[in-house]
Image (spheres, grey):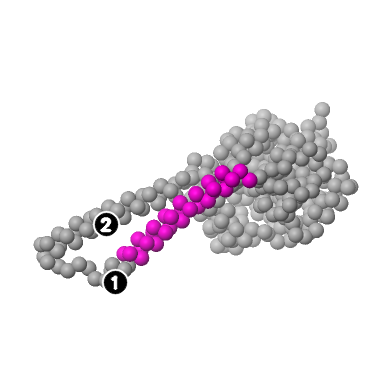
Amino acid sequence: MSELLSLIVPCYNEQEALPFFNKEICKVAAEMKEQYNVDFEFLFVNDGSKDHTLDILREMASRDPRVKYISFSRNFGKESAIYAGLENASGDYISLIDADLQDPPALLLQMYELIQSGEYDCIGTRRVTRKGEPPIRSFFARCFYRIINKISNIDVVDGARDFRLMTRQMADSILSLREYNRFSKGIFGWVGFRTKWLEYENVERVAGSTKWSFWKLFLYSLDGIAAFSTTPLSIASAFGMLFLFIAFVLILIIIWKTLVFGEPVAGYPSTMCVMFFIGGLQLFSIGILGQYLSKAYLEVKRRPIYIVQETNVEAVKKG
């Protein structure tokens, strides 16, 4: 009896890449059917694309019964697209992959062979090089991985991609985390399970342009830190205690110098510098508190993670 592999493909303005991706993934699916007797379900999640991505998905679905698509009412973000795919996938194994072919589909054969051994619950992929990326972006990416691994209790592998193959059990465990503010790389690490990492060199997009600007990646990294670590709150508290102690010591020194030596209190410029410094530190600490408060605010609203506008999936789950 053949097993079913659900391939989840988040799409946002991928009209140029989809024809190339479809050709490549169909070739891989044919090889896996021949070698391992694996059937495929292609589950494309259109994340509110503004180009002709949805039209192409409709056409693909009309020609290939394996193609399923879910189209959001607007752009909810890649994290929501991943969750929608996992929630509506029906396979024995579930894989995530991008449509731009930066994730080599041919690796699926090796990934499936490894997961079939029973030693692993997930086969993940990571890039060992960042060739083609701007140096400043690569530098900050490496810094982010170092920071989040130091201040959280999860293991986020440097260069890890969303491209992975996992068992149904692991996918169901991920779905049990229905948090609104999602950071999948952290969630994959938090749920645990035995993971094998496959390494490959960076591959350029086959067509189109990246949707991740430096600013979007920066905000995404802040979401990840806030979702899986409370260390920034502790840092803010530590700063407060430190400067309270320094202020207390300075007050004692000023009183002592005034009483013993009759020296006047320090001048206006130094006082203003101290005020600006401490004021800036207070605003920084309040900003950290605001980040966590905003996340809690969004969670308690219990809004759906995504809203479906159109789909060809029967009995689709809607966020």
Magenta stretch in the rendered image: 274-303
Residue closest to the eye, 188 or 281: 281
Q: Amino acid at mark 2?
A: Ala
70 inside magenta stretch? no
Where is residue 281 drawn, in percent x and y? Answer: 39, 59
- Labelled disc at residue 235: none
Where is residue 203 drawn, in percent x and y? Answer: 69, 55
Q: Tag 1, which secondary structure?
A: helix
Side of 277 relative to 186 (left or right): left
Please tell me in which quadrant of the rendered image residue 138 appears. Answer: bottom right
Q: Residue furthest left?
A: 260
- Labelled disc at residue 269: 1
Residue drawn at x 31%, y 52% as measured from the top left: 242
Looking at marks 1 and 2 on the same chain, the residue that comes earlier in the sequence is marked by: 2
Tell me if mark 1 has few (under 14), some (14-19) or many (20+) residues whose alpha carbon lies within 10 angstroms of its own. Answer: few
Is residue 110 visible to us here? no
